[in-house]
Image: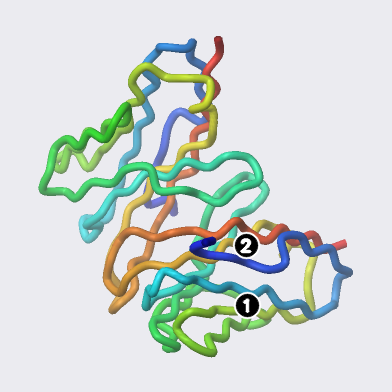
Amino acid sequence: QQQVKQSPQSLIVQKGGIPIINCAYENTAFDYFPWYQQFPGKGPALLIAIRPDVSEKKEGRFTISFNKSAKQFSLHIMDSQPGDSATYFCAASDQTGTASKLTFGTGTRLQVTL
Amino acid sequence: DTAVSQTPKYLVTQMGNDKSIKCEQNLGHDTMYWYKQDSKKFLKIMFSYNNKELIINETVPNRFSPKSPDKAHLNLHINSLELGDSAVYFCASSPAGAGTQYFGPGTRLLVL
């Protein structure tokens, strides 16, 4: 049972392009939606996050678009660079007492070519 | 000034052995987590502790036992290792009740 569905599985774009990664969720109890970036051999690093009362959030070249009614959210990377080549994970969080339980998507492997 | 650290970075062992992975965070967070990332890169939560108290315990074999000696440390002990335990194990931490989690560099476990 995949509670957070992510697509595409992999993506190749040219430098300067705008890759878009999409996620959809089912559990309406989710209240926080972070995106993580993971380089080979490293741990996931928080990139940007959004709460469901906001439809869009932008930080530098990274933008999250959020559609609460459709239960979908997406990551856009403006002016992509070869250094952005990594695996990107969307996630959704719900509270369990004093802990937040992150449910991850399956990841998108992004390659930015010159 | 590492925020979340794990030791060891690599662990190669034989089936049936018992091993431990240690995690420490210096962020002052109250909540710590263990995640497993399988060969397909899928990340799944295993456990969460808040100030030494177990909060989340997903469907994990009881061969896995987390232990939190204090709120800055969360260790993972694995008994009777199996081939299927081969994965990367990540520790993470967050302020209590916050959705933002900070991950360690991972421990790559290979069971032969």
Pick the quarter of the image with the C terminus of chain A.
top right
Q: Looking at this view, is B31 or B84 the one in front?
A: B31
Reading the image, the residue beneath label 2 is B89
Q: Are marks 1 and 2 on the same chain?
A: yes
The amino acid type, in three-letter code, at marker 2 is Tyr
Rendered residue at 39%/74% (across/down): B28
The amino acid type, in three-letter code, at marker 1 is Leu
Q: In the shown orientation, is residue A21 left or right of residue B38?
A: left
Residue A3, position as x, y percentages in the image: 37, 52
Q: How many marks?
A: 2
Residue A21 image-quadrant placement: top left
Q: Looking at this view, is A15 or B89 the one in front?
A: A15
Question: What chain does badge 1 belong to?
Answer: B
Q: Among all residues in the image, which is located at the extreme front? A: B1
Mark 2 crowdedness (10 Å alpha carbons): few <14, some 14-19, many ≥20: many
Residue A88: mark in rendering: none
Q: Looking at this view, is A64 or A68 the one in front?
A: A64
Residue A39, position as x, y percentages in the image: 57, 39
Pick the quarter of the image with the N terminus of chain A.
bottom left
Residue B22, position as x, y percentages in the image: 64, 75
Marks 1 & 2, CB-CB < 8 Å contact: yes
Secondary structure at badge 1 equals strand
Q: Of marks 1 and 2, which one's residue comes earlier in the chain? A: 1
Rendered residue at 33%/67% (across/down): A100
Colour approach in the figure: rainbow
Question: What chain does badge 2 belong to?
Answer: B
Secondary structure at badge 2 equals strand
Rendered residue at 86%/67% (across/down): B13
Reading the image, the residue beneath label 1 is B76
Q: CA distance from mark 1 to mark 2?
A: 9 Å
| Vertical relation: B48 (above or below) B9 | below
